[in-house]
Amino acid sequence: MASSLKSGHTLLGACWRLGSCLQPAVTKHTRCTVPHITCCQRKKSTAVSKSYVPETSLSRSPWPELGLYDKEKEEQEHQAVVEKVNSLLQKQEYGRLFAVVHFASRQWKVTSEDLIQIENHIEAECGDHILLEKVLLVGGENFTLIGKPLLRRDLVRVEATVVEKTESWPMVHMAFWKRHRFQKKRIIIQPQTVLRINTIEMSPTLF
């Protein structure tokens, strides 16, 4: 038992001496190599930060960059579009037309044979033909004309017929205050006018 303890102490002392001999060499080696690596990494990182800019929404926009405005090119493209639309109008190859008109303080998107109901009475009688002159937009199958804010009267013509002049169903508004003997009843009947869009016509040329 005593011999085994003595041999254990001897082995432990040998390991301790071996570790103390190896520690300076390892630390000396690491002290020589670690600063060199850190200096290289520092130089490399500073070089990248000066030249490299990451692509973000602030450095580069997601949409394609537009060139400078060329007036001559813009006029040529505009003239080509006008000629194409004029050819479609002359041949009447625009399909079913639709329009956005302003009438009775509202905007209506209409096409031929549409019915629109207006919450008011107009001066025209049933069966009268009227013109909707405030046209904001007109379009076909291959083109759309937008006014600024209105289109010219000689460019588009929207005709409608007064179909019916009637009244709405009675709307009852009841106000009641319990335990105060208060109640108020009001019946509202709104005048109405129904129009039918007959035709939407366009001139054969834009200008």
Image (cartoon, rainbow, N blue to C red):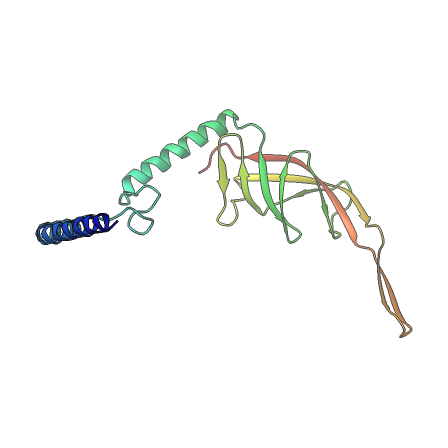
Where residue 106 appears, x then y in whole percent? 64, 51
**Image quadrant assignment for residue 101:** top right
Where residue 15 appears, x then y in whole percent? 16, 49
Q: Residue furthest right?
A: 181
Residue at 82% from the left image edge and 48% from the top image edge: 166
Where residue 176 appears, x then y in whole percent? 86, 67
Q: How many marks?
A: 0
Residue at 16% from the left image edge and 53% from the top image edge: 13
Q: Is residue 192 above or below residue 183?
A: above
Between residue 69 and residue 184, name the one nearer to us.
184
The quadrant in which the C terminus is found is top left
Q: Is residue 80 above or below residue 149?
A: above
Between residue 128 and residue 151, name the one nearer to us.
151
Q: Is residue 38 visible?
A: no
Q: Is residue 175 visible?
A: yes
Q: Is residue 133 left or right of residue 52?
A: right
Q: Is residue 105 left or right of residue 37?
A: right
Between residue 202 and residue 166, name the one nearer to us.
166
Between residue 24 and residue 140, name the one nearer to us.
24
Where residue 97 appears, x then y in whole percent? 58, 33
Q: Is residue 205 left or right of residue 73?
A: right
Residue at 35% from the left image edge and 44% from the top image edge: 62
Residue at 91% from the left image edge and 73% from the top image edge: 181
